[in-house]
Amino acid sequence: MLASAPSPVSTFEKVLRAFGTGGFTYADLVMQLERLLAIGASPTAMLEALRRRERIEPFPEYAHVEVVRILNAAIARRAAEAAESAAEYEPDAAPDQSADSVFTPARSMPAECVADALESEQNQRRDIDDSLAESITSNEAARSRSEEALRESKRYRTELSVLRDTLAARDATIAQVLNSLGERDAQLAALQQQHARLVPRLEARGEQLEAELRAVQARTGALAAELATARAALQSEQNKTRGFDKAWVEGLAANEAARSRGEEALLEAKRHQNESQALRDTLEAREATIAQIRHSLGERDAQLAALQQEHAKIVPMLEARVKAGAQPEARLSTPRPDAIALELKAGKEAATLQELLRSREWRRGFDQNMCGELEARAQAAEAERAKLQTERDDLKGQVMRLRSQLGANMVQVDKMRMAASAAAFPQSAPGAGSRGQRVSGSPVRKQGHGSTSIARPVIVSVTAGILAVAVLAVAGWYLIQRAPAAKEASVLASAAVADPGTVIRDCPTCPTMVVLPGGRFKQGSLRAESGSASFETPLHWVAIGPSLSMSSNAVTVDDFQQFITDTGRDIRGCDIYDGEWKHRPDNSWKNPGFPQTGSHPVTCVSWNDAKAYAGWLSTKTGHTYRLPSASEWEYAARAGGEAVQPWSANGSAACAAANVADASAAQRYPGWTVFGCNDGYVYTAPVGSFKANSFGLNDMLGNVFQWTEDCWHADYNGAPVDGSARSDGDCSEHELRGGSWFSTPAYVRASYRNHFAADYRTSSVGIRLVRDIVR
C-alpha cells in the first residue's frame, strides 16, 4: 500500500525548520515557498504555520518580512481570483459581497456553504491585516538591522582590505628580511674567515695586555697607598683647619662680646658723665641760691644797722621829753589855766613815746629773729653746698676710675683684636684683609703655632671679660648708691634737651604730634606680673632719646581718606567680628563691620598699609614720619611711670581712661570676659573720647591695637636698649600694642605684646605714628 503524500503545510514547516538549523539558505527558503504556492498550498495555512514556528524560535527579520510579504501577496491574489469567479457565475450577486472571498461555484455549492466560506475569508482577511501591521513593524526593525548589518559588513570589508594590504606589506617585509638574511649570512662567513685569521693575533695581544694590566695594577696599588697617605694628611690638615676656624670664630665672638660690653660701659660712662654735668648744673644753681641768700642777709644787716642808728638817736630824745614832762609838785599844784591841757598833752606824748618804744623793741626783736633764721639757712645751705661738693668730688673720682678702667678695657680689646687678626692671618701683609674675612691662599700654620695663636685671644678675651664685669659691677654699685641723684639729673637733662608738650601739625590733614621728653624706663614685666610673661621678659632698661614726637591720637578715618584720594591704594578685605572672626572680602577701612565717622580711628589696615601711609605723609610734608618702635610705644604708654595700667587693680576705673571690652559689649555679645564698668561703646569710639595720659596722648590703651616697626620675637633676649626697632626674628609678622575695643582685662596693658602678619587686616587694628625731630 502506497504511503500518502505529505501536505503542503507540513512540507512548509520542514522547510522552516531546515532554514532555522542552517540546512536551507534564504534563497532555498524562498524557492520552496513559491513552489508550494504554485502547487496550490494555502497561503493562510502557511502563514499560520510561520506564526507557530516563531512562537517557538524567532525568525530572522529579513526572512520574516519577505516570507510574510510573499504569503500576503498570495492571499490577496487568491481573494481577487475568487471575486472574479463569483462575478462570472453570479452576476447579480450583492454588490457589497467581499472581493476577497474565496470563489465557490454557486451552481455547485449551497448558499449556506457560500456564507461560511465568505465568513472564513473575512476572518482570514482580518488576520492578514493584523499580520500586515506586524510585518510592517517587523520590516522597519529588520530594515534597521539590515542597514546595521550592511555597515558592519562594509566595516568588515574595509578591515579585510586593510588586513590584505598589511599582509602584502608583511610579505614584502618578509622577502626583504630574507634577502637581508642572505646578505648577513654572506657577511658572517666573511667574518668567520677574518676571525680565523685574527684569533692568533688577538691571543698574543691579550697576553701582552694582561702583562700591562698587571703592571698598571701594581702602579695603581702604589698610587692608592700614596692617595691614602695624602687623604690622611689632608684630613689631619682639615681637622686642624676646623679647629683653628672654630677657635677663630670663638675668639671673634668673644671679641664681639667684649666689644659689646665695652660699648655698653662707654654708654654707661657717657650717661654718668651727663649725670655729673647735671649735678654740676645743680650745684651751680644751689651756689647761686646761696649767693642770693647771702645778698639778702647783707641787705638785712644794713637795715638792722640803720634801725640801730635810728634807735640810738630816738632814745635821748625820748629821755629828754620824759624829763621835760616830769615837773615839780609845786609847779603842778600852781593853778594855771593851761595845766589841764598841758597834762593831757604830756600824757598823750608819753603814750605815743611808749608805743613808739614798744614798736621799736618789737621790730628790733623781729629783725634779730630774722637775722638768726637767715643765718641758720645760710649755714644749712653752706653745709648742703659742702656736701654736694663732696659728692661731686666723689663722682668725679668714680668717673675718672671708670674712664681709666674703660681705657684699659679698650686697650685689652684692641690687643685682643690684633691677636685675633694675627691668629686668623699669620702670613698676610698689613691691610690685606678686613676683620671677619679670611685671605685666600694663606697657608695653614703648622708645628703648634696655630694652638699658640688661638690661646692668646682666649686669654685676652677672658681678661677683657673680667675687666668688663668689674666695670659693670662698679656702674651697678654707683646706680644703686646714687639712684636719687641720677633720677633728678635725668629729669633735668630731659627738660634741657626736649620741649615736652610742644604740639606740631605739619598740615590741616596731618595728625597732631606731641613732643615727648627723653628718658629711661624698664621695659617688659616680671614673670609673676602677667599670664603672658614669656613674651614680656626679661625686664630691662631702655633709653629713649629726646628727638621724638608722637601723634596724640590714632590716625582717623578723615586723615586716612586723604591718603587714599592721593594714592588710589586698593585696600579691601578685612577680618570682622560678629560673634566670631570671619574674613570678609568686601569689607574695608570704609566699612569695618560697624558704623564709624571721620573722627573714629581708621581700622582694617595692615602693617604694609601703615608703612605706605607714613611714607606718603613724609613725602607730602618733608618730615620723617614712621611707625613707632615697640620700646618707644611702651615708653609713651607708661608716660613716665612704672604702672602698666593707669587704673586700679579691679579695673572699675578703666572705662574712664580707655575703650575696652565692657558691660555694653557683654550685652551685645554675652559670654565675654569684660571690665566691670561701662564706657558706652561696643566698637570703636571717636579719638580723644577718654582721659589723656600725662604725656598728652589719647587712647594709648584700648580702642584699637596699633602697629609698631618691630619684627616679632618671642621675648626680649637680645632686644635693643636704645629705643630702636627690632629687625631680627620673624619679619613676616610685626608687633602690635595697646589692646582694642575687643580686648579683655588681661590684655589691656602697656607691656602686653601681640603680633600679626604684615598683610593682615582686621577691624581691631589701627595706626599711630611718630615724627622725628631734627635739632
Image (spheres, rainbow, N blue to C red):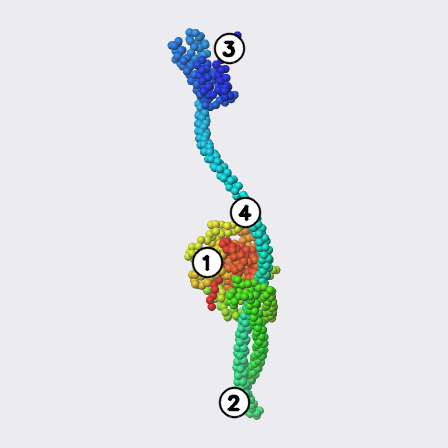
N-term-proximal mark, 2 vs 3: 3
Q: Which residue is denoted by mark 4 in the rendering?
A: 205
Q: Secondary structure beneath disc 2? A: loop
Q: What residue is drawn where x is 53% and y is 88%?
A: 313
N-term-proximal mark, 4 vs 3: 3
Tag of residue 613: 1
N-term-proximal mark, 2 vs 4: 4
Q: Which residue is denoted by mark 2 in the rendering?
A: 337
Q: Nearer the viewer, residue 563 or 731?
A: 731
Q: Amino acid at mark 1?
A: Tyr
Q: Position of residue 571 (x, y in %)?
A: 46, 53
- As measured in the structure, the alpha-carbon distance from the residue carrying label 2 to the one carrying label 4 is 184 Å
- As measured in the structure, the alpha-carbon distance from the residue carrying label 1 to the one carrying label 2 is 107 Å
Q: Residues within 10 Å of mark 3 (few under 14, many from 20)?
A: few
Tags 2 and 3 in contact by the CB under 8 Å rule? no
Q: Amino acid at mark 3?
A: Ser
- As measured in the structure, the alpha-carbon distance from the residue carrying label 2 to the one carrying label 3 is 219 Å
Check the image and name the residue furthest to the top.
Answer: 107
- As measured in the structure, the alpha-carbon distance from the residue carrying label 1 to the one carrying label 4 is 87 Å
Tag of residue 695: none
